Image: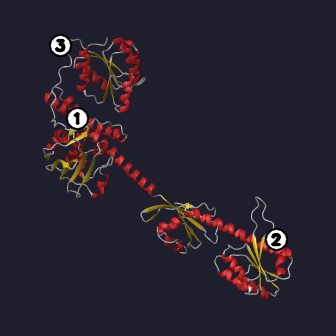
């Protein structure tokens, strides 16, 4: 009985002995049995029958002379069958002439042993054959594992022979190239990947390889890396191509965004210089003719108009920042879009009149009620109408149409202006995007209005789209907003009455402390408040503000937040900590207008937060309210 493997011991290799001589077969079995599991066969057909349901032995000891078929014929059959082509075969025979040995080896035997032989020699030869087979099997398993690994990679892997012919492609490469791997093997690399610039690779003996220029394949872009390896039968060079399409598109998008940013900054500088130039000219005129009432009136109009223009630009920039970060809170209520459109048209009427453009509005009699923030919706349509006016030549026409389609309100703003090139339509709502035209440049603009439009409309659950048949064929912007059933009154704009004087006769002046490190702003604010009848004192920084407050005991403090030393928040906190100032009116007047800044102001004890440039009417109203309620107790 043959010994089986001990627990934990690897299974022993199997050797089949085919010999019609029972004695010689038994002698061979004894020689091999100490190391291998042995099975005995008397003829060739029994071997073939056993192979039909068995994977085969690790080695075959085959006698040349068998009763049914020749051992060499059996060997030839085994070599012709793919399943047994690599089976190690040792032919044994009494024929020992060189011609016999050569015939046996030619028939497919791996080794030839002449009878009689020593048992130790037989064991050594069979052991060598089994060892070689096991090494080959391990190598084949490793190759299969490597091929499986390469086939599961998302990268394209191509191996080349020294002549540049393809010796291997992984599954991803075959998929991308649309061919079976066996169809690609043997092709020249230039035929496989025509856009691959192999001439750019650096040949070096260290084998570090080199990245090559991007290689387009179809609609994808791949980054190739070439690595030379020691020349083998399989390959001398491996090329790995990684799909970098998304990275390259992102880089291109970032490059375009950076370019738009640079263009925007240049345009911003241009747009800021225009009002500043007008303001500087107005101030120069008042200096030349200080007593000329006509010049002073004209200069004041310029200052008011240009200041308002700069304020709108800054507000738009802040709106873009707040909307893109989700910081805008809509004050929604049922509102009739017809009322919103009327206000938007009134706001933009001066711009279209100045350009002698015809502005036609058709809103119909049916209410178009949406759940929206009327101020933000008005901002949408003001932007669209102003955009149409900017891109329409003098004497052109602009039409605003509003109606109902199923349960959606549809507003169309149509013009016969410069139109939009087809290549610009996909980016027309992108931040800083502008249609290039001499008219647009002449009219200016920061390229953020349409971005605001899209963002605000989206926040209302609607959509906006742009249409144009091409340059000089006009354009149309369409806003769609969901309708609601709740009624909303059609409210026309109401003119506001002039504000009454701040200080009523016979009442003591309100004491106001103005704190700002900007000397011009502090002085002008003090002059403006003094002219309105307030008693004003000044401080230039936070610490001096605390000293002046303790000395003057103001009724109200108009406080800049960005102060040297200690900031305005800290000034407010220290004033509130002093019982003497617990009820003093604290008004923040700052360039910081984000929601987080207002939260900080409230936490510091500030009553009202204004954003520069200050609306003096609103500031007077706040101070008047405190004045009418009496000084803090």
Residue 387: x %, y % from top left: 23, 46
Residue 62: x %, y % from top left: 76, 80
Q: Which residue is mark 1?
A: 281
The disc, 2 or 1, on the residue closer to the chain's N-terminal end is 2
Q: Is residue 544 left or right of residue 150?
A: left
Q: Nearer the viewer, residue 462 or 57?
A: 57
Q: Residues within 10 Å of mark 2 (few under 14, many from 20)?
A: some
Asked where in the image residue 384 lies, by quadrant, the reply is top left
Residue at 62% x, 64% y is: 145
Secondary structure under the numbered disc 1 in the rendered image: helix
Residue 605: x %, y % from top left: 37, 21
Is mark 3 in CB contact (under 8 Å) with mark 2? no
Asked where in the image residue 220 lies, by quadrant, the reply is bottom left
Q: Nearer the viewer, mark 3 or mark 2?
A: 2
Position above or below: 137 against 449: below
Is mark 2 in CB contact (under 8 Å) with mark 1? no
Q: Nearer the viewer, mark 2 or mark 1?
A: 2
C-alpha gap between disc 3 and disc 2 = 128 Å
Q: Which quadrant does the N terminus fall into?
A: bottom right
Q: Residues within 10 Å of mark 3 (few under 14, many from 20)?
A: few
Q: Nearer the viewer, residue 151 or 473?
A: 151
The disc, 3 or 2, on the residue closer to the chain's N-terminal end is 2
Secondary structure under the numbered disc 3 in the rendered image: loop
The disc, 3 or 1, on the residue closer to the chain's N-terminal end is 1
Residue 240: x %, y % from top left: 54, 62
Q: Which quadrant does the C terminus fall into?
A: top left
Q: Is residue 246 left or right of residue 626?
A: right
Residue at 73% x, 76% y is: 88
Asked where in the image residue 553 lies, by quadrant, the reply is top left
Position above or below: 626 against 59: above
Q: Which residue is mark 3?
A: 505
């Amino acid at each position: 009985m043959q010994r089986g493997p001990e627990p934990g011991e690897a299974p022993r290799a199997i050797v089949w002995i085919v010999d019609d001589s029972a004695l010689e077969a038994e002698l061979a079995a004894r020689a091999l049995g100490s190391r291998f599991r042995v099975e005995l066969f008397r003829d060739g057909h029994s071997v073939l029958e056993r192979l039909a349901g068995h994977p085969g032995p690790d080695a075959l000891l085959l006698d040349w002379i068998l009763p049914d078929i020749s051992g060499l014929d059996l060997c030839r059959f085994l070599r012709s069958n793919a399943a047994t082509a690599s089976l190690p075969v040792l032919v044994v025979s009494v024929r020992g002439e060189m011609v016999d040995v050569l015939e046996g080896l030619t028939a497919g035997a791996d080794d030839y042993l002449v009878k009689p032989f020593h048992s130790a020699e037989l064991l050594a030869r069979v052991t060598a054959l089994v060892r070689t087979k096991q090494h080959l099997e391990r190598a084949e398993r490793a190759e299969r594992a490597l091929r499986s690994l390469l086939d599961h990679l998302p990268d394209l892997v191509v191996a080349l022979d020294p002549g540049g012919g393809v010796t291997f492609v992984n599954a991803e490469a075959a998929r991308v190239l649309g061919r079976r791997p066996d169809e690609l093997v043997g092709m020249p690399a230039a035929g496989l990947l025509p856009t691959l610039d192999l001439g750019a690779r650096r040949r070096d003996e260290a084998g570090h390889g080199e990245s090559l220029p991007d290689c387009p394949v179809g609609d994808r872009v791949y980054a190739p890396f070439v690595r030379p390896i020691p020349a083998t039968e399989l390959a001398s060079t491996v090329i790995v191509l990684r799909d970098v399409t998304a990275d390259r598109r992102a880089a291109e998008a970032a490059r375009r965004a950076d370019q738009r940013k640079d263009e925007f900054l240049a345009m911003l500088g241009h747009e800021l210089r225009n009002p500043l130039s007008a303001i500087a000219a107005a101030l120069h005129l008042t200096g030349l003719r200080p007593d000329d009432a006509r010049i002073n009136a004209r200069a004041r109009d310029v200052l008011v108009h240009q200041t308002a223009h700069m304020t709108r630009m800054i507000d738009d920039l802040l709106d873009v920042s707040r909307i893109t970060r989700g910081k805008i809170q809509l004050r929604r209520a049922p509102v009739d879009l017809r009322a919103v459109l009327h206000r938007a048209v009134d706001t933009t009427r001066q711009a279209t009149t100045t350009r002698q453009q015809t502005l036609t509005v058709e809103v119909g009699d049916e209410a178009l009620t949406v759940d929206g923030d009327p101020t933000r919706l008005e901002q949408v349509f003001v932007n669209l109408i102003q955009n149409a006016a900017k891109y329409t030549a003098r004497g052109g026409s602009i039409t605003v149409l509003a109606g109902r389609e199923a349960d959606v309100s549809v507003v169309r703003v149509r013009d016969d202006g410069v139109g939009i090139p087809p290549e610009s339509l996909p980016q027309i709502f992108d931040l800083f995007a502008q249609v290039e035209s001499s008219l647009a440049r002449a009219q200016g603009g920061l390229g953020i209005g349409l971005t605001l439009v899209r963002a605000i409309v989206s926040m209302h659950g609607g959509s906006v789209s742009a249409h144009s048949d091409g340059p000089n064929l006009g354009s149309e912007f369409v806003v769609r907003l969901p309708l609601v059933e709740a009624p909303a009154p059609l409210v026309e704009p109401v003119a506001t009455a002039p504000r009454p004087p701040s200080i009523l006769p016979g009442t003591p002046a309100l004491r106001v402390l103005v704190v700002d490190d900007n000397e011009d702003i502090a002085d002008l604010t003090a002059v403006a408040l003094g002219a309105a009848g307030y008693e004003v004192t000044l401080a230039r920084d936070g610490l001096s503000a605390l000293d002046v407050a303790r000395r003057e005991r103001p009724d109200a403090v108009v406080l800049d937040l960005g102060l040297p030393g200690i900031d305005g928040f800290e000034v407010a906190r220290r004033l509130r900590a002093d019982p003497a100032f617990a009820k003093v009116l604290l008004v923040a007047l700052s360039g910081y207008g984000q929601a987080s800044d207002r939260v900080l102001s409230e936490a510091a004890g500030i009553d009202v937060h204004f954003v520069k440039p200050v609306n003096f009417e609103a500031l007077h109203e706040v101070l008047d309210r405190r004045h009418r309620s009496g000084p803090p107790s």
